[in-house]
């Protein structure tokens, strides 16, 4: 049995870091594992300009512990009235790599998102010209659509037309959760890829109700049936460059999760790589981890692969119950569970 793993240092292609004092908790966790991360722009207010993205980037860099290097790759939040000129400015900055499409109302801090994709056709054309990546939260918000079907319906209503109308636009279908999404990406042109989170590889929707309501397993898109988890695991471990690591680590304070109307988001930033290793090992696919975690995302984004490495050892340890978080606590995914792999630092 293998008990040491050395991988090219991975990157996180979908990460929420938030802002303010909590950066000093979450940035060191990510920087310990990952060389780079695509940082989501759903702050309050959202990051809609290059100036705001660059200022946010500096605040993140200030929270990186000495001795670690971490490159935050920034994104802009698309709104119905984003000016087309923003795209050239973002592209020229060298630090803004992508724009994020949140359908208005789909998830945490998405109220200023796009109400109709037709409102951003000009911006998408400019992104296509500047070869800027579009990151997509792929769920419809139509209240008539069952919450478990929102991703599948989004493929039909929005993604298929989008990929047809913008054939040169690179699109990342973020945090996919269904077999439908796996098949869509597999059959789409090579301008389309997807990220997969640790929680969607580890759990099916039963985890939301195991012995009671489990708010720390609640994220969006919500966990799905076992057959969808199996399809995601097969995609992640199958060696295709179209699926890569994106944690969607989304920290929320305990009181915001364990509430009458709890926030969506799982915090995996502390131990994401160890969680992915466990999921890949359980699938008998450790050999496929390096491509998924460290190569395919960089290739898709057109960046060079990292040249340094990380090491993991087989050693059991318990996921901490919580971290201090802005006067409250942050409960990590799988808190209190025993993990069998540990990152060596
Ligand atoms: C994310 C957050 O909290 O910002 N929540 C989540 O459940 N994934 C937003 C998102 O990516 O949908
Ligand atoms: Zn997210």
Image (cartoon, rainbow, N blue to C red):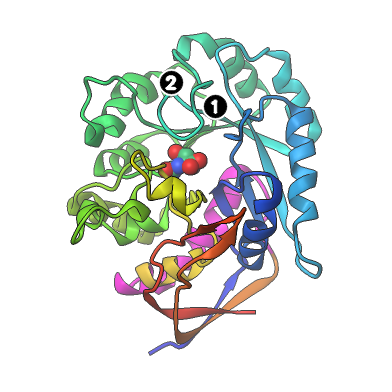
Q: Secondary structure at mark 1?
A: loop
Q: Check residue 294 for magenta coloring.
A: yes
Name the side, left or right, on which 326 lies relative to 167.
right
Give the magenta part as a residue range. 280-306
**The magenta stretch spans residue 2:** no
Q: Could you say which disc has been placed on residue 162 in the image?
A: 2
Of residue 100 and residue 299, the one placed in the foreground of this image is 100
Q: Which label is found at residue 169?
A: 1
Q: Quadrant of residue 234?
A: bottom left
Magenta stretch, main secondary structure class = helix
Badges 1 and 2: C-beta atoms under 8 Å apart?
yes
* Left or right of 258 on screen, residue 37: right
Answer with the quarter of the image where residue 162 lies.
Answer: top left
Residue 130 at x, y percent in the picture: 68, 25
Report helix, strand or loop for mark 2: helix
Q: Residue at x 23, y 32 (%)?
A: 149
Q: Nearer the viewer, residue 191 or 137?
A: 137
Mark 1, Cα crowd under 10 Å, few <14 / some 14-19 / many 20+, is many
Q: Horizontally, is 301 left or right of 107 in the view? A: right
- C-alpha gap between disc 1 and disc 2: 9 Å
- Asked if residue 317 is positioned above or below residue 76 in the image, the reply reads below
**Residue 113: in sight, yes or no?**
yes
Where does the N terminus fall, quadrant-wise? bottom left
User: Residue, x 68% and y 39% (percent of image)?
Assistant: 74
Q: Pick the quarter of the image with the C terminus.
A: bottom right
Which residue corresponds to the image point at 62% horizontal and 67% vertical from the top-left? Answer: 9
Q: Residue at x 46, y 60 (%)?
A: 331
Q: Earlier in the sequence, mark 1 or mark 2?
A: 2
Crowdedness of circle 2 by 10 Å Cα count: few (<14), some, many (20+)? some
Picture coordinates of residue 97 (x, y %)?
Answer: 67, 37
């Amino acid at each position: 049995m293998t008990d040491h793993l050395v991988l090219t240092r991975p990157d996180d292609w979908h990460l929420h870091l938030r802002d303010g004092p909590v950066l000093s908790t979450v940035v060191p966790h990510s920087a310990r594992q990952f060389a780079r991360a695509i940082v989501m722009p759903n702050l309050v207010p959202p990051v809609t300009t290059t100036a705001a993205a660059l200022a946010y980037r500096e605040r993140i860099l200030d929270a990186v512990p000495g001795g670690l290097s971490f490159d935050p790759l920034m994104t802009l939040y698309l709104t119905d009235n984003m000016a087309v000129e923003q795209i050239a400015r973002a592209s020229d900055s060298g630090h803004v790599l992508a724009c994020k499409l949140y359908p208005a109302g789909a998830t945490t801090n998405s109220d200023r998102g796009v109400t109709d994709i037709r409102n951003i056709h000009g911006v998408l054309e400019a992104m296509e010209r500047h070869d800027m990546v579009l990151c997509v939260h792929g769920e419809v918000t139509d209240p008539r659509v069952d919450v478990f079907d929102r991703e599948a319906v989004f493929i039909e209503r929005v993604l298929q037309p989008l990929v047809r109308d913008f054939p040169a636009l690179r699109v990342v279908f973020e945090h996919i959760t269904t077999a439908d999404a796996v098949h869509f990406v597999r059959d789409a042109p090579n301008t389309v890829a997807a990220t997969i989170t640790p929680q969607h590889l580890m759990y099916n929707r039963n985890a939301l109700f195991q012995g009671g309501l489990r708010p720390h397993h609640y994220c969006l898109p919500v966990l799905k049936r076992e057959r969808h988890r199996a399809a995601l695991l097969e995609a992640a471990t199958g060696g295709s460059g179209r699926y890569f690591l994106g944690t969607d680590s989304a920290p929320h304070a305990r009181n915001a999760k364990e509430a009458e109307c709890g926030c969506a988001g799982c915090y995996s930033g502390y131990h994401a790589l160890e969680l992915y290793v466990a999921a890949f090992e359980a699938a008998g696919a450790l050999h496929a981890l390096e491509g998924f975690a460290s190569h395919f995302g960089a290739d898709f984004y057109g960046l060079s692969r990292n040249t340094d490495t990380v090491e993991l050892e087989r050693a059991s340890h318990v996921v901490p119950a919580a971290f201090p978080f802005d006067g409250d606590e942050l409960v990590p995914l799988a808190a209190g569970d025993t993990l069998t792999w540990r990152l060596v630092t």
